Image: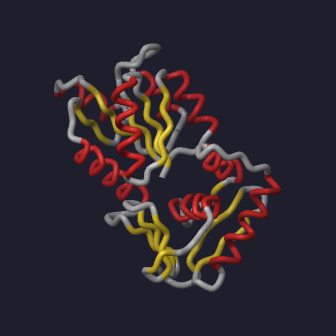
């Protein structure tokens, strides 16, 4: 699960990245709104944590820009602005949740997991496709309840396809998802990786379909 943290307070950002990475999340940090937009265009993220007091623009301005771009990603505002009007404005501009600083780390993790469940996995932290289960809370993929051994690249690709199961995922989105972890794969290397993952899961009631010209689609071959 890749998170973009948009926060210019270096101490707070370092603390959040350290704590959340221990919980299995992968984080990148942007200290300005402009850099955040560049990262969101270049890489694949599953969730955004947004501070409103950015040095180059107001966070609400950035929020509006992202929503105007039809960016379908959960956004959690993390701000010292604690008035009811501020919270209402943040939600009305397109934020999915709003937390006030200072905050408890345990509550932040709970809010993140709740957003993931709501946006990707219904009302459970387990996303099931065929015989596979993606545990979004513990960042694991299971096969019939047992840990499914995968390489880091295989896990990243299958995680993305399971999060988006039933929807076509473009090849460039897979490339962005991998690049957010410090890797870059050319188109032919992605095709090889998809083929390898496809072979790993083909006997487990799930299939990766190629939608020519569009991307890849993960589906269960039986009712999930």
Q: Residue at x 47, y 14 (%)?
A: 56
Image height of 28 relative to 125, above or below: above
Q: Residue at x 32, y 64 (%)?
A: 123
| Residue 162 in picture, x, y percent from top left | 53, 65
Q: Residue at x 79, y 49 (%)?
A: 186
Q: Residue at x 41, y 22 (%)?
A: 8
Residue most extreme to the top: 56
| Residue 108 in picture, x, y percent from top left | 28, 44
| Residue 195 in picture, x, y percent from top left | 75, 69
- Describe the colour scheme in one phrase: secondary structure
- In-image side of 86 versus 161 (left or right): left
Image height of 151 relative to 185, above or below: below
**Hey, which quadrant is residue 87 in on the image?**
top left
Q: How many marks?
A: 0
| Residue 73 in picture, x, y percent from top left | 47, 44
Observer-nearest residue: 90 or 11? Answer: 11
Residue most extreme to the right: 188
- In-image side of 12 versus 166 (left or right): left
Image height of 85 relative to 16, above or below: above
**Hey, which quadrant is residue 95 in on the image?**
top left
């Amino acid at each position: 699960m890749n998170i973009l943290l948009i926060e210019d307070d270096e101490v707070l950002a370092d603390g959040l990245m350290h704590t959340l990475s221990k919980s299995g999340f992968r984080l990148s940090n942007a200290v300005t709104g402009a850099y955040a937009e560049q990262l969101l265009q270049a890489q694949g993220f599953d969730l955004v944590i947004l501070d409103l007091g950015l040095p180059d623009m107001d966070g609400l301005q950035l929020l509006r820009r992202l929503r105007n771009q039809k960016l379908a990603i959960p956004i959690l505002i993390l701000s010292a602005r604690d008035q009811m009007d501020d919270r209402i404005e943040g939600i009305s501009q397109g934020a999915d949740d709003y937390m006030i600083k200072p905050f408890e780390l345990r509550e932040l993790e709970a809010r993140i997991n709740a957003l993931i469940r709501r946006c990707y996995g219904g009302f459970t932290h387990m996303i099931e496709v065929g015989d596979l289960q993606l545990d979004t809370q513990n960042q694991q993929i299971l096969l019939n309840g047992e840990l499914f051994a995968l390489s880091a690249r295989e896990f990243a690709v299958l995680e993305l396809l399971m999060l988006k199961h039933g929807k076509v995922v473009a090849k460039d989105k897979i490339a962005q998802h991998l690049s957010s972890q410090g890797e870059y794969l050319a188109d032919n290397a992605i095709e090889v990786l998809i083929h390898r993952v496809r072979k790993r899961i083909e006997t487990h009631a799930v299939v990766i379909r190629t939608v020519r010209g569009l991307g890849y689609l993960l589906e269960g071959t039986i009712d999930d």
